[in-house]
Amino acid sequence: MAKKAHSFHIPVMGIGFTIDSPLKVAQFGIDSVISLVDDILVEKMRKVYSDKFEIPYKEISDKVDDFRAKRITSYLNLLHDQTEEKFNQLKNITSEKSKALKDYIHMLPEYSSLKKEFTKLTEDGVDFSKIKDWANKNLSMGSIDVNIMTKIDKGNYLNKELLPIEYNDAHAALRGFSESKLSSSLVLSAGMNPRLYSYMSNFKDFFPDANGNIKKKIILKVSDYRSAFIQGKFLAKKGLWVSEYRIESGLNCGGHAFATEGFLMGPVLKEFKENKEVLKSQTQELLIAALKEADKVLPINDLELKITTQGGVGTDEEHTFLMEEYQLDSVGWGSPFLLVPEATSVDEKTMELLSNSKEKDLYLSDSSPLGVPFNTLRGNTKDIHRQELIDKGRPGTSCPNKFIALNHEFKETGLCTASREYQHLKLKEIDALEISSEEKEKKVNKVTEKSCICVGLGTSTLLLNNVSTKKTGDGVSVCPGPNMAYYDKIMSLRGITDHIYGRGNMLTRNDRPNVFIKELSLYITHLQDKVDDVKATIDKKQLRSLTKFKKNLEEGIRYYNEIFTTQKQFFVEHKEALLNALQAEQNKLVLIGVEIENLK
């Protein structure tokens, strides 16, 4: 059985930034995740790669029945075939072709048994047939995983008639993945969608076979233990197993930020580590009962359960610490990979903006039509375009894709809050209100701040591949996490893997805060904002919520104090600086605590 090559994975980024990452990195054993939000982009990319690989291409137009699912299946099958071909070439070595194999071996971590075996095998010169045999037995390809945001599940219409629920956006994307050749994982993010979860049980690939193997695995992206357990049990009752819980920092991540109530990454990881066996045994019990009842195959072997994390990790020491302290299976590295052209798809101009960005340029905005705080880079061209439209007195966009047309205030079929149609109607409504001009301005800004991200997050890929953006415009939205501030150069794939495994250093700044401290400081700012927001109109429920939030942060600080004080192996050199930074954050929290007390 081929062993897993790497201890890191590349998470989904935006809509287009990792849309073709598997074609770039899977042959080297690196797992990556592509977004299934945008079937229009998926279809364009299938054309780009069909031309590139000289494969016959027949367009799947939006006039075809079930076009969204069919586009996704076709693109995923193309990725499947092409990555396998690349991987087979890499293993099928002859002297001329061995660069790819050398790269594969070089990029592995130093402790990798594969690396040690290969070194031993080639000590006494190179025997190609031996190496080929060994590579075929031992090397594994990176997984082509896909992501569905469960909330983006808009209903669709044909001739003004609402189509059945299986034609909803997330349902169709799920079907597209289910019917593909891939043997990989579906990452479900943005919380629970019971109808979508129930729909999964229609596809046999999600169920275990007699040996406990599952062709299409489920990964849940979560930010706290409680919600993970609830969702895991819900799926288990349908006979569906969650193979991996992927814990993402609530605030120190890219894209949409699903803030917790002050539960910090360290304590959350500790809770998962301590409860892993409970989580596994209780969900497995429910699963077996559900499979029995449905008369499905019962696995004779124990099912695999992985715990992984991502969000703001930036040094090999942090990577190794997280892996060892919390017994993790993998750590996700996101934002730094936006500066690795060999791994992601980012146009030149955006890459320049990213490499020059500092802390002040990376902020949490209200620009997402989903109504969830969204990580944004100042000066992104999509926001410049948005402002130009406001200045012209025509706020909002034409909404060509309609993926986030989920607001039903004015239209039964739904509108996107970033669309011109919605903003026009909403601003008219605000204009008629009898409130102060200050209040009006606030409300107007809240409406016009929404940006057309479902187009903007895919534009970079189109520009990079010279695909026309005539219909959608060439404005790029980009959503790196705060960690981006500490990376300022374009990196090679070998360069970034050397950085992750401690063989090289890609950081030029030496003032990057520790991953835990950075997240804590983001949460303290977040709490301060919450307090400021409710000062004028506080009620008992909000007060309880703020008090609980503060208490969770205090517990997190206590835990970090203990971790940093007792660590003998990690963060030893910087112990004093870490404890001082922790103390500084604690002082800020004390002041916020006084403000909360005064609100009573």
Image (cartoon, rainbow, N blue to C red):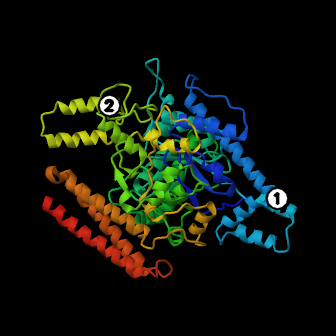
Instruction: Identify the secondary structure beneath mark 2.
Output: helix
Mark 2 is on which residue type? Answer: Tyr
Q: Position of residue 501 (x, y in %)?
A: 59, 69
Residue that lies at the very extreme toward the top in this rendered image: 159
Quadrant in which residue 544 is drawn: bottom left
Q: Nearer the viewer, residue 153 or 228?
A: 153
Q: What residue type is labelled 1?
A: Glu
Q: Which of marks 2 and 1 precedes in the sequence? A: 1
Q: Which of 188 and 125 is in front in this view?
A: 125
Is residue 26 positioned above or below 509 on the image? above
- Kindly identify which residue carries mark 1: 96
Q: Nearer the viewer, residue 361 or 534?
A: 361
> Dot 2: within a 10 Å radius of its alpha carbon, few (fewer than 14), some, or many (20 or more) residues?
many
Q: Residue at x 64, y 51 (%)?
A: 24
Residue located 56% across and 40% down the image: 293
Q: Residue 359: x percent and y percent?
A: 38, 62
**Quarter of the image that includes the N terminus:** bottom right
Taking the spot 68% from the left edge, 44% from the top edge, the residue there is 80
Residue 410 in sight from this viewpoint: yes
- 554 lies left or right of 599: right
User: Which of the pair 520/418 is nearer the observer?
Assistant: 418
